[in-house]
Amino acid sequence: MQTASLLSLISGAVLFGVITRYPIAPFAWMAIALLVHASRSTPLLMGSACLWVALYPALAIGERGVMPIPGPAYFVTVAAMTTSVAFPFAVDRLAGVRLGTFGMTIVFPLAWVAAEFLRSRFSPAATWNSIAYTQFGYLPIMQVAAFVGIWGITFLIAWFASTFELALSHGFEWSVIRVPVSIFASVFGLIVIAGTIRLTAAPTDRASMRAATLNRPADLFVPGEMTRITEGRVSSDERPRIAVKLARLHDWFLEGSRREARAGARLIVFPEGNLLVFEEDEAAFLDRARRIAADEQVYLAIGMATIHVGALLPFENKLILIDPAGKTVMSYLKSHPVAGWEAGIMRTGGGLVPVVATPEGRMAGAICFDADFPEFIRQAAQGKADLLILPANDWREIKDIHLQMHAFRAIENGVPLLRAAASGISTAFDPWGRLLGLTDYFAAGDRTMTAQIAVGGVPTVYARTGDLFAWLCVSALAISLCVAAIRPQG
């Protein structure tokens, strides 16, 4: 391997490892372009092997603490992920050269979208590690998600890399690269212009409501205690002591709800699994919550963990919505447990996103990992939701990337999103992905977040067509591979 190719490979792998943990937008474009250059400037077999070897430690380091997988299984999972990342480069080398100048720029993004999309459908990780999420904050480009989902953004980044490499390999000879470079530049420019217009044209005069998210007291439980309670591992001897703590927790949330309601909040959301309650105490707690909702004329969206001590599946991960009349209008069980610990203890829901009509608009609900599945959350838009309520529970290593992922669900479906996060960042986004409020659980001070949210959905193409673009990429890749197989090289 030549020195320039080796430097490109190492630099690209390092940048790719960085963006798995820190979604820095320019790094994604640079990383993929550098890796394509290293791949195409090296003999096929050696290049593929070197690419895999370089990517594996980058991902192993970048994903440490992000993927909740202990022991040797972590390294096996990283190996599988590395293989899926290396797949588009192998396809590019095998097929691209047989498809002509323009084909060399298209087959790589087709393969990258196909790899990401099929991984999201057939692996437990959902859409984690999609390079589209690195573009959080670049609002004109983010608007692509409203039309074709995150897959369009993935395609754009990979398309830039293959187009740039084509131009570089031909010494930027305009007579050779004119058509593919002009096509990419035109599409990219139209996307930026259209995205800017979409943002500029967004209405600013819609009626809004004040919303607040609460969080648990940081010093109530000792480390690991909430996990043990959630697992239902509470002995009869310690049950009275734990019950006292849970009573304090209940008082904390209900008193906080009353305080925020009197400060003007119309909707108050508790994070995922933040309010622990034993099965036999659930009815009494919800009676108290309903009285406060009615007394203060406020909506309470309660992220709640109902614990069945000693049961095989002791954990019910719930979202309960109570309206200002004190009526329970939504009771939802999380549909997608995180593989591993949560999947081993949680009772799952029925796989439907609930949407309920209220005087404030149609409210939809989901919980944390549910929102990492775009096609699942699309049910909110199909139900004409005006607001998506999303309790979540993160940890320090994923708090930034996870909240940024959820901004794309708001854009895809044209629905404002209110996210209340335990051990993470509570946020609110409007239907264009603009941040309306933010509070970090790990920051000092009050962990209550307030935001003024304009309730109301906006139509999007993605809400109608879903992942059609991704499936078209999969189909186009299959056709391209067939054409390449029968076309001689040269």
Image (cartoon, rainbow, N blue to C red):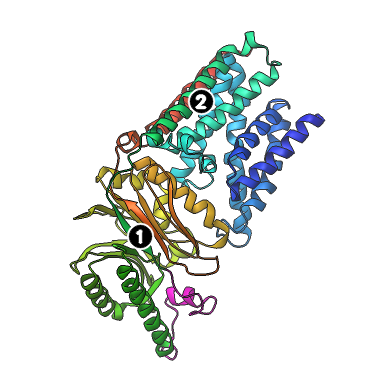
Q: In which quarter of the image is the C terminus?
A: top right
Decide if residue 7 is on the left or right side of residue 215.
right
User: Measured from the top left, where is residue 98 in percent x and y?
Assistant: 59, 16
Q: Residue 334 carries which label?
A: 1
Q: In which quarter of the image is the N terminus?
A: top right
Crowd tier of the residue under label 1, counting other residues whose Cα lies within 10 Å: few below 14, some 14–19, many 20 or above: many
Position in image of residue 127 (x %, y %): 47, 45
User: Which label sits on residue 410?
Assistant: none
Give the magenta-colored segment's residue range.
215-238
Could you tell me how far apart the alpha carbons at marks 1 and 2 are, in whole angstroms?
38 Å
**Label 1 SS:** loop
* Lateral position of residue 13 relative to residue 451, left or right: right
- The three-letter amino acid code for the residue at tag 1 is Lys
Q: Which mark is residue 188?
A: 2
Q: At which x and y percent is residue 79?
A: 62, 47
Question: Picture quarter containing residue 279?
Answer: bottom left
